[in-house]
Image (cartoon, helix red, strand yellow):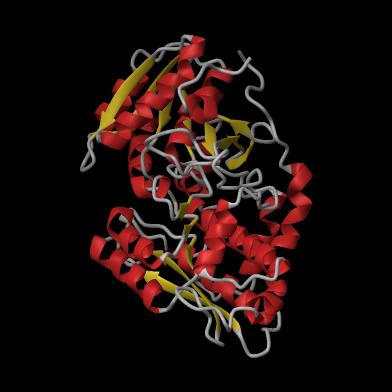
Amino acid sequence: MAGRIGRQDTAGTRAGRAGRLVAAAALLPALLDLTGCAGGAGAAEGAGVTVLTMAPSGTGAADRSGSTALAEAIGRSVSASGGFGGRRLHVLTCNEQDTAEGATACARQAVDAHAVAVIGSYSRHAEDFMPALESAGIPYLGGYGLSGPEFSSPLSYPVAGGTPALIAGSGRQLVAAGCRSIALVRPDNRTGDTLTRYLSGALRPAGVPLTDVKAAEKAPDFAALARAAVGGDHKDACVTTALGVEQTRGLLDAYRRLAPARTRLGAVLGGVQQSVVDATGGKAGPLEGALVTGWYPPESSAVWDELRHTLQGTPAGSPVDASDLGVQTTWVAYQVFFQAADRLASAGLPLTAKTLRNQLDSGDSLDTGGVTPPLDWGMGSMLPSAESPRLTNTWVTFQQVENGRLAQQQSGFVDVRWVLTGKRAPQ
């Protein structure tokens, strides 16, 4: 079953659009001049428009300070475009400290500042902070997808398909590569149970058996996990992991010591990203040749040129890594915001939290410059799922580690919506 599967959409045909997205910030002068007379949440009141990005910092392994640093860089880029008659885009950032209290405090900051949106954030505490945003009518645009409300709240607008889309895509990628048995190493929790279900659905049409290997959330025995995943090291056996970055590194260390001769590695992006490939030995490490499923094209793709350009001149020691999935999600979220804001300006409408929500809900597709297929949150695009009704982007990319670098395994995007909805595989 080697070869391409699923409907394809070529990223290269849209790569030239990337330059227009940050350039859309230059259109904000006219847009933001319309906001002075708007009332309610998101009103600019003569001073511009405010948005907020939150992420944990100073917490250790949970840190995602690159997301807030990128948001600040985007704010500086907009300001450098010339401003707009004394007004500007106010980009607030907030350290949510990886705690429910911290995340709730960040949401209250957005409410107090009359933010029109919380954009491109990273937090696993949406159950705690979303009620504050919902009460104020503030949309949550482009969260990382770490908790249920991000895919269920009517005010949440996820730009990627979360771990379910990645794990379903990983199954299809490994089947296409010739895997005849697959072991999944995943967290031993309810989220992990869901991932097993999605991966099973992706494997079922090919009749590929799945071995479910559960990793304790705290202090897992990586040696035992690696042995259970590799099993008898059979021909055409594959292992895929859906763990976090630090746990993935621990598993890879154990896998390398085990030194299986025939088992092939797969992974979902996030647990395996370029920094993990580098830290585990690059092209001499266990990830060389690994198949990796991602939400977006690899960092080496031209679709990220504007992101790299925006990061030029960032302070030395900046935590922004253009290959980090959290940073990339923040970038996509801001591009969606700029596009939606431009549509409102073209229609002669003010930019407020309410008008922004209406634009996002309209079904009008928004271009992300080839980083994703065009996005919209109209009723016809959302996933018919009780678990994730706000999920609209069910497309993934297939990548592979070659010479120590993540690169495209095949061009374009693969749609795994049929897996997530439990339908039959497309012919």
Q: Residue at x 64, y 32 (%)?
A: 409
Q: Position of residue 119 (x, y in %)?
A: 49, 63
Q: Residue 249's image quarter? A: top left
The quarter in which the N terminus is drawn is top right
Q: Would residue 238 be seen by someone viewing this image from the given angle?
A: yes
Seen in the image, is 305 located left or right of residue 391? Answer: right
Q: Nearer the viewer, residue 361 or 145?
A: 361
Residue 321 drawn at (x, y percent): 53, 59
Find residue 363 and report its horizontal and vertical position in percent: 61, 48
Picture layout, residue 322 above or below residue 39: above
Residue lying at 66% horizontally and 52% vertically, measured from the top left: 366
Q: 421 or 208, which is in the foreground?
A: 421
- Give the position of the C terminus as an image quadrant: top right
**Relative vertical location of residue 419 with respect to residue 20 in this rendering, above or below:** above
Residue 114 point in image, percent of width and height = 44, 76
The quadrant in which residue 96 appears is bottom left
Does residue 261 appear in this view? Answer: no
Q: Nearer the viewer, residue 198 or 140?
A: 140
| Tally of marks | 0
Residue at the spot 38% in from the left edge and 68% down from the top edge: 136
